[in-house]
Image (cartoon, grey):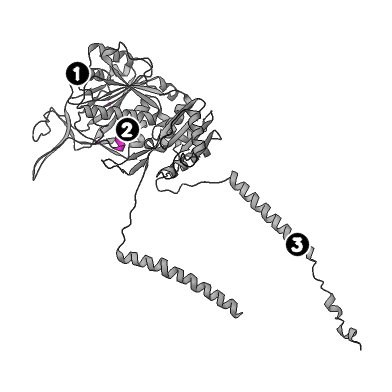
Amino acid sequence: MTDSAQNTPPASAKAKPMPKRYGIGLNVALQVLLALALFAGVNRLNYYHYWRWDLSPSQDYTLSPATLKYLDSLSRDVQIYIVFGRDSKVYGEVQSLLEEYHLHGRQRIKVRSIDPVRDIERAEQLKADTGLSLAQNGVLIRCGANKRFITEEELVVREKGTSTNKQIIEFRGEDAISSALISVVEGRVRRFYYVVGKGSRSDEAQSDAYNAAIDLGRQQNFEVVQVNLSEISHIPTDTDGLLILGARYDLSEREVSMLNGYWQTKRAGIFVMLDPGGETTRLNAFLTANGVHPRGDRVLMAESTSTGPKKEFSVLGEFMKDVPFTRHLVSSAITLAGQTESLDLLEENTSLKEQSINIQPLIIAAPRYWGEKQFLEELPIVDEEDTVPPIYVAASIERGAVNDESQRADSARMVVVSNSTLLDKQTMLAVSRDFVATGLNWLMNRESFIGIPAKSKHAYRIQLTSRQHELIFWVTSITLPGIVLAFGFMVWASRRAA
């Protein structure tokens, strides 16, 4: 037998030929293409069809129903510019909030972010286009020729105090941005006239109320203009509302006549904060004629304690549950500092009903308070001349109210509060500010934008002992890296042994 015969492989070995190399390559290429097509298809579906969940404890990234309703009816294109340095503490929240406006704006809202420190060229171009200095962080909203710049300070509420580094306690971004959005789309800024020349508890109190009203105007899309009723012959025709806040001296007969004339017009709006210590007989008579009678007493709580008599004038109040425009405040309590008088609401007065005047209580004092006539006594007690609970300290008046919501825009409205300290800088609470903002929106027939909540900011601190610090160091710096190193060494050793 020759060597060639011995080296010839058996026939069975030729039965399974090896696949050709180009066939393997084609198979792999097809698998790769199919994988890429599947990946692209899934991502495309995910881009157009997805769900979003806000898992933050206070729903920081969820727009209110009022804002969503407005965005759904938006008929004009809006450009929003986030003009913020990236080191701002609220930049992330502002960006996330405006992304929600973009997503729900039906392609009407375009959002761009500009860092004036890093994007100098784009920032300068925006300055040239708008004529704004953009000297501070803020949000610029444009619609056609209308524009509104919201500063960072208008988006937040800081803690009280004299510290230069005040912490942010509330984020009011949605409230401010939605109001500004209405402003630029409608192209008209509402106007409230702030009545001056009638004195106040102090110059500081008057300044606080005026400045607080201006701040509210910036966020709620209205401007505040001072007016002295003794210097004009009639209430200006462009008035969307009058602010009579803490007047110490009374109106004249001519001024009351002007006030009555304005109140008889359609869509009149008046916000009154009474000073119980003021001499405002004619103003009180005007309010009484429209269903709210200030009693001239003082709402207080007094008791005898082991340390002597205790008399408390600061009133803890609750919001009424059956009033639609304050319904979002029902879960909050409000404290009225200083002095407060009780209000007699003439809800069943036949003459008022004939005039289609509807009176509703807004704030009721806690049950332990009563209306005391002899409030200067050291330890007053309830007697026949005093007013017992329920004690109302704020009320609304609506003239021309009808059941048909579509016709209610023509009603005249008034809010009366029997306390003048709601807007004092030293005692103003967030809920007080929200109540005033709610009342002003109601006067402007803006029920749809009442109740946009502020987002509370919470700071969390974890206190660790020295032993806990040491344990964290050993776990994170020694134990965990050691486990990873040991596992890697085991893999290396097993491969080397193989």
Front-most of 314 and 102? Answer: 102
Q: How many marks?
A: 3
Q: Relative to the observer, which residue lies in front, 40 or 121?
A: 121
Query: At 71% across and 55% down in the image, what residue appears?
Result: 33
Instruction: Answer few, some or many: residues within 10 Å of disc 2's Cα (few below 14, many 20 plus, some between 14 and 19).
Output: many
Q: Which residues are magenta?
A: 415-435
| Circles 1 and 2 in contact, beta carbons < 8 Å | no
Name the spot of residue 231 as percent of width and height, x first: 27, 13
Residue marked by disc 2:
435
Q: Secondary structure at mark 1?
A: helix
Numbered tag placed on residue 25 in the rendering? 3
The type of residue carrying mark 2 is Phe
Position above or below: 51 against 429:
below
Distance Cα–Cα, label 3 vs label 1: 98 Å
The three-letter code of the residue at mark 1 reads: Thr
According to the picture, the residue beneath numbered tag 1 turns out to be: 281
Tell me residue 295's x, y (percent).
Answer: 19, 24
Marks 2/3: CA distance? 73 Å
